[in-house]
Image: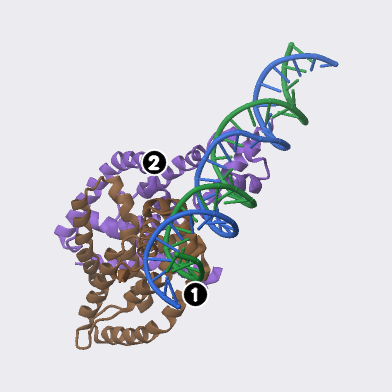
Chain colours: A purple, B brown, C green, D blue
Amino acid sequence: MDNNIESSMEQNILEVAERLFLEKGFAQTSTTEIAKTVGCNQALIHYYFRTKDNLFNTIFENKFKQFFQGVFEMKNMENMQFIDKLKLIIESHYDLLRNNPKMPSLILNELSRKPEQLNLIRDKLQSIPQVLFTLLNEELQHEIEKGEIREIKLVDLIVSIVGMNVSLFVMMPIVENLFSLNETQKENMIEHRRAENVDFILKSLRP
Amino acid sequence: MDNNIESSMEQNILEVAERLFLEKGFAQTSTTEIAKTVGCNQALIHYYFRTKDNLFNTIFENKFKQFFQGVFEMKNMENMQFIDKLKLIIESHYDLLRNNPKMPSLILNELSRKPEQLNLIRDKLQSIPQVLFTLLNEELQHEIEKGEIREIKLVDLIVSIVGMNVSLFVMMPIVENLFSLNETQKENMIEHRRAENVDFILKSLRP
DNA sequence: CACTCAATTAATAGAGTTATTAAATAGAGA
DNA sequence: TCTCTATTTAATAACTCTATTAATTGAGTG
């Protein structure tokens, strides 16, 4: 009954590989380095996963799916004001990124060059959120007609939200370096920008 | 007088290398591939530039400097309304990115891992724009006092502008793939988001 | 014409990479 | 104890990459 550690080596490899891939990207991480970090022989990685690509996919296919699913995961927002819903969506998206701060860069780097993996995500984007999209769109149009929100296309709003949120985390490593932020300052900035992004976006939507 | 072609091989190497580095990143581009694309022997690259790092730096030290300088390059905006100035700044920044759409990704990828190169940029950021920053800040505060613009910190405004503009170009390769945009659709989207970003930001600044 | 020197190439060293294979090890069950 | 199986390792094949070196070419100069 050693299964509580669940094949510790395989699990270790998965965890270490995920960390290294996120930190340094796919090409910059060798199976040799993964093995050294795990503390096992390099061949063991190929025993469990056969190829490096396979290892990467095993780790990230699910992760990407989860990640993109997270974007569209809505809490119970039935009887909320549209503006409050929007605020919650922006904050949820931001928190998702904050909990996975290296994901955007990895996605941007690896998925730009590997269109095949994008198919998974394309599917996700067509099933679940299509409903949500039309639903949100209706509400948005309604708010616009009521004069609560200025004229804007939902697609443009989404691009702006995602853009504002994502950009912070992809730029963070540079900003951190450029202004020699320590951990606290960085944390403060991330906390501050969470409110700032919400504020900036909602302010823009006033009629 | 063959100098109009200006040492064609060296020049070719620089041009091809720049293109490939921008397309695929530093690690993913080998000197072998550069040589093959140029149509010369791989050793020639090392003859001219000794190391791959050297080649990269030769190309991009200036380019990065230019790029960041471009961000702060102001036209004659003496007797303009603040809002119009801001609009011009956003548009100039956007156009700079549009003319160098691959630069943000390259900077984000390469400079995150090579802090030494950031020193160049740190200098640039401390000399020229410090003046500009205080100048802009005064104007912004003045506008806020006049009630023309809502309360906001200049730093937050800048982060929002840069973020909105940069994010479009770093996300573009994914968006393009995900929604199978053809060249025209892509061009349309880029053109449309230029106006949209300006609009979105200026709308947010209303008191 | 012989010389020089920059440009260019062929060859290769040396390090690092992924992936495979065969052997060693260890734990479970007969 | 013996055997079977899953795990792990050592060794190494087969590449690819950067960088160096020695040899070759070719254009100009005295």
Residue located at (23% from left, 82% from top): B82
Q: Residue at x 26, y 84 (%)?
A: B143
A94 horizontally vs D13: left or right: left
Q: Is residue B169 visible?
A: yes
Return the chain for callout 2. A
Query: For this view, does A181 lie left or right of residue B8?
Result: right
Q: Give how far apart the Cα atoms at labels 2 and 1 are.
A: 36 Å
Q: Position of residue A79 (x, y in %)?
A: 30, 51
Q: Badge 2: how crowded within 10 Å, few (<14), some, or many (20+)? A: some
Mark 2 or mark 1: which is in front?
1
> In what quadrant of the picture does the N terminus of chain A appear?
top right
Judge by depth and name the residue closer to the eye, D4 or B155.
D4
Q: Quadrant of residue D4?
A: top right
| Residue projecting furthest to the left | A145
Q: Chain letter for mark 1, please.
A: B
Q: With respect to residue A54, does A93 lie above or below? A: below
- Compared across the picture, whether C1 is left or right of B158 comes to right
Q: Which residue is mark 1?
A: B119
Residue A170 in sight in this render: no
- The x, y position of residue A38, in whole percent, is 65, 45
Residue type at numbered disc 2: Gln
Disc 2 secondary structure class:
helix
* Residue behind mark 2: A117
Q: Residue at x 18, y 52 (%)?
A: B184
Marks 2 & 1 on one chain? no
Residue flagged by tag 1: what amino acid is it? Asn
The quadrant of the picture occupied by the C terminus of chain A is bottom left
Residue A71: x, y in percent? 37, 49
Task: Decide: few, some or many residues near mark 1? Use Cα within 10 Å; few <14, some 14-19, many ≥20.
Answer: few
Task: Relative to A100, say whether B4 is above or below.
Answer: below
Q: Nearer the viewer, residue B68 or B144?
A: B68
- Comparing B148 with A179, the one in front is A179
